[in-house]
Image: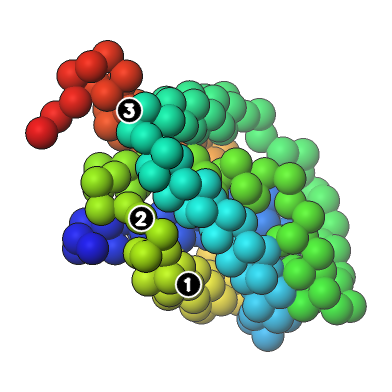
Amino acid sequence: MTQSLLFGAFLAALFYVLIPGPAFLQLLGIGAGQGRKAGAFFMMGHLVGDIIWSSLALIAIVGAKTIGTFVFDLLGLACGFYLAWIGWSAVNAKPKAEGQALVMVERPFRRGLIFGVTNPKGYPVALATFTALVAGSAGALDFEALPVLLGVSFLGFVTADIILIGVIGAGAVRRFYRAHERLIVRCSGVLFMGFAAQALWHATPGLLGWRRA
């Protein structure tokens, strides 16, 4: 188990939560209208979905590795293109309509739980993000390392949740996001494209027979 593998799993979980997406925007709306407590309950519920999707993603990645490096590289290539597509879509996203009313959620925990578990993009995004950030340590991946990776990922999720909960209730943050939403979304798109480049960088040599020692 290498430090780079553990750090990659931690960062993958951290960025999976922090990068703006549907759940981030939902959290912002709840936090802006109902405060940090409601936002915290939403994130507690959503954490269940984060754990489920990240567990399935890591199992798929480790399974691909034990089957063979070719399968893992092919998975990395597909995930790299998927991340590039997400990033490109974000960079070219049109600004949302202004003047939308904030939605009041009576049961934030239940909303977060349902939102996290039923999010159709949860698994592919988790798979793509984790693949991009742990591909460089593919040689250390096996099922024995899975519990430790899940534990480190859980710490990444909790850290990201604490960061978000700490800032969503601030009026300045809400005003800043509304004023710069397009820029924030585009920057997140650039970050996704960076992950895509990293995934492709690690996958392509193996597929071409240029496996680095």
Comparing marks 2 and 3, which lies closer to the viewer?
A: 2
Q: State left or right for residue 190 relative to residue 207.
A: right
Q: Where is residue 4 in the image (x, y as percent from the top left)?
A: 21, 57
**Quarter-wise, where is residue 70 in the image?**
top left
Q: Name the residue under label 1.
A: 154
Residue visible at 20% across and 60% down?
A: 2
The amino acid on which the numbered mark 3 sits, given as a three-letter code, is Ala
Q: Where is residue 137 in the image (x, y as percent from the top left)?
A: 25, 48
Q: Which mark is residue 203?
A: 3
Q: Nearer the viewer, residue 83 or 168?
A: 83
Disc 2 and disc 3 in contact, CB within 8 angstroms: no
Q: Nearer the viewer, residue 130 or 94?
A: 130
**Quarter-wise, where is residue 190 in the image?**
top left
Establish if 23 lies above or below 180: below
Establish if 47 lies above or below 79: below
Establish if 193 lies above or below 100: above
Q: Where is residue 141 in the image (x, y as percent from the top left)?
A: 32, 53
Establish if 198 lies above or below 47: above
Q: In which quarter of the image is the C terminus?
A: top left
Which residue appears farthest toward the left when viewing the image?
213
Q: State left or right for residue 207 relative to residue 90.
A: left
Determine whether the residue tagged by mark 3 lies in a helix, strand or loop.
Answer: helix
Determine whether the residue tagged by mark 1 lies in a helix, strand or loop.
Answer: helix
Disc 1 and disc 2 in contact, CB within 8 angstroms: no
The amino acid on which the numbered mark 2 sits, given as a three-letter code, is Asp
Q: In which quarter of the image is the N terminus?
A: bottom left
Determine whether the residue tagged by mark 2 lies in a helix, strand or loop.
Answer: loop
Q: State left or right for residue 31 relative to residue 205.
A: right
Q: Work out whether mark 3 precedes mark 1 in sequence or the reverse, and give the earlier one.
A: 1
Measured in 3D between alpha carbons, the distance from the residue under mark 1 to the one under mark 2, in whole angstroms, is: 18 Å
Q: Mark 2 points at which residue?
A: 142
Whether residue 98 is visible, yes or no, is yes
